[in-house]
Image (cartoon, rainbow, N blue to C red):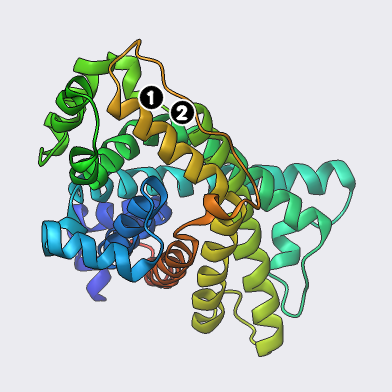
C-alpha cells in the first residue's frame, strides 16, 4: 500500500487546502521574504521624497548619524504585516479577474483565450494578452488600495517622524510633529486619529488610489509580457523558467515605479502635510508634476529596491506554486 493511502484525514485536508489556496500561500510567504530584503531602501526612498536630500548617500549618512541603524527599520512592522496581507489579496484578486477576463475575451472575440496564448511555447504578447493583464491588474490595485492606505500612511509617519521633529516650525506644529516621534505603529495610528479624526487614516487616498490602479496595471503587464518574451528568447518550454521569472520580476518593478513615481512623491508630500497639521489647518497640497526633476528625488534607489524586491518575490512565488502543484492529489 502506498504511503499516500496511510495519510491521516488531516494531512489529506492540508494538501487539498494547499492546492486550493496555492496563490495565497505563495504570495504571502514570498512577500514576507521580499519585504525584509527591501525595507531599508524603501525607508531611504520615502525620506528623499519628503525632504531635500540631494543624494542617496547624503540621506543614508544623515539617517545613520541621527538615528543609527534602527532608523532604516523604523516602522517596519506595519508594512511587513500590511504588505504581506495586501499583496496576498492583490494577487488573489488579480488571478481571479485574469482567468475570468481571459475566458470572456476568448468567448466574445471568438479567438484563443489570452492565457492559452501566453502559455503556448514561442508565443509573443498580443493586444488581447496585454489588455487582459492590464485590466486585471488595475482592478486588483484599485481594490487593495482601500485596505493599504492606512497602513502606508502609518509607515510614512514612522519613517519621517524624526525628520519632521527636527524641522523649524511653530510651537503648535512641533506638538503635532512630535507626537509621531519614536512611537509604535498603534500609537502612531492613534495619534493620527487624534489630530485628524478617523478619516485622517485615509489622508492622500485619492493619490494612493491613482498610483496603485495605474501602477499595478503596468506592473502585471510588464511582468507577464516580459516573462513571455524572455521564455521565447530562451527557447524554454516552461512558461515559468527561473531566469525569465527573476528578470521579468525585476523589470516590472522598475517600470511600474518609473510610471508612477511622480504620483507617489505627491502622495508622500501630501501625507507629510497632513501629518504636520491638525485637522482644519490649511496647507498647500502638492501637485503631480510628471517629468519635473524635483518630483523624482529617490527614483534610482526606489527602482533598485523594487527590482531586488520583485526578483526575490516572483522567484519565490513561482517556486512555491510549483512545489504545491507537484503535491500528489490525496485519495478520498
Q: Quadrant of the C terminus?
A: bottom left
The image quadrant that residue 186 belongs to is: top left
The residue drawn where x is 38% and y is 63% is 329
Secondary structure type for disc 1: helix
Q: Looking at this rendering, what residue extends furthest in the bottom direction?
A: 235
Image position, residue 157 (x, y; %)? 26, 38
Q: Quadrant of the N terminus?
A: bottom left
Image position, residue 153 (x, y; %)? 32, 35
The residue drawn where x is 21% and y is 60% is 63
Image position, residue 297 (x, y; %)? 47, 57
Any part of residue 327 in sight: no
The residue drawn where x is 68% and y is 43% is 135
Relative to 177, residue 109 above or below = below
- Observer-nearest residue: 130 or 49? 49
Q: Is residue 145 left or right of residue 184?
A: right
For disc 2, the neighbor class at 10 Å (few under 14, some 14 to 19, many from 20) is many
Q: Is residue 42 left or right of residue 106?
A: left
Mark 1 → mark 2, Cα distance in angstroms: 5 Å
Residue 202, disc: 1
**CB atoms at circles 1 and 2 under 8 Å apart?**
yes
Secondary structure type for disc 2: helix
Residue 316, disc: none
The residue drawn where x is 73% and y is 72% is 120
Image position, residue 62 (x, y; %)? 22, 62
The image quadrant that residue 226 belongs to is: bottom right
Residue 205, disc: 2
Q: Looking at this rendering, what residue extends furthest in the right direction?
A: 110
Amino acid at each position: 500500500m502506498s504511503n499516500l493511502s496511510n495519510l491521516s484525514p488531516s494531512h489529506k485536508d492540508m494538501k487539498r487546502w494547499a492546492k486550493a489556496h496555492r496563490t495565497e500561500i505563495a504570495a504571502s510567504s514570498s512577500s514576507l521574504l521580499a519585504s525584509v530584503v527591501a525595507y531599508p531602501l524603501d525607508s531611504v526612498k520615502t525620506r528623499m521624497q519628503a525632504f531635500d536630500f540631494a543624494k542617496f548617500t547624503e540621506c543614508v549618512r544623515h539617517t545613520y548619524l541621527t538615528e543609527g541603524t534602527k532608523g532604516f527599520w523604523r516602522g517596519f512592522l506595519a508594512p511587513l504585516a500590511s504588505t504581506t496581507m495586501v499583496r496576498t489579496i492583490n494577487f488573489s484578486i488579480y488571478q481571479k479577474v485574469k482567468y475570468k477576463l481571459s475566458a470572456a475575451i476568448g468567448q466574445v472575440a471568438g479567438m484563443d483565450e489570452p492565457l492559452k496564448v501566453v502559455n503556448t511555447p514561442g508565443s509573443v504578447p498580443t493586444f488581447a494578452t496585454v489588455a487582459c493583464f492590464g485590466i486585471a491588474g488595475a482592478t486588483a490595485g484599485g481594490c487593495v488600495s482601500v485596505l493599504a492606505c492606512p497602513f502606508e500612511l502609518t509607515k510614512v509617519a514612522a519613517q519621517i517622524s524624526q525628520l519632521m521633529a527636527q524641522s523649524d516650525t511653530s510651537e503648535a506644529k512641533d506638538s503635532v510633529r512630535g507626537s509621531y516621534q519614536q512611537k509604535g505603529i498603534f500609537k502612531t495610528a492613534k495619534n493620527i486619529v487624534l489630530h485628524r479624526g478617523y478619516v485622517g487614516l485615509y489622508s492622500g487616498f485619492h493619490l494612493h488610489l491613482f498610483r496603485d490602479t495605474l501602477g499595478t496595471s503596468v506592473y502585471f503587464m510588464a511582468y507577464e509580457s516580459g516573462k513571455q518574451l524572455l521564455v521565447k528568447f530562451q527557447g524554454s518550454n516552461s512558461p515559468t523558467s527561473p531566469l525569465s521569472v527573476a528578470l521579468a520580476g525585476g523589470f516590472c518593478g522598475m517600470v511600474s515605479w518609473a510610471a508612477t513615481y511622480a504620483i507617489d512623491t505627491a502622495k508622500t508630500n501630501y501625507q507629510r502635510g497632513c501629518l504636520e497639521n491638525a485637522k482644519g489647518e490649511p496647507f498647500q497640497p502638492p501637485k503631480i508634476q510628471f517629468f519635473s526633476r524635483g518630483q523624482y528625488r529617490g527614483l534610482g534607489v526606489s527602482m533598485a529596491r523594487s527590482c531586488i524586491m520583485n526578483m526575490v518575490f516572483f522567484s519565490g512565488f513561482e517556486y512555491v506554486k510549483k512545489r504545491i502543484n507537484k503535491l500528489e492529489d490525496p485519495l478520498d
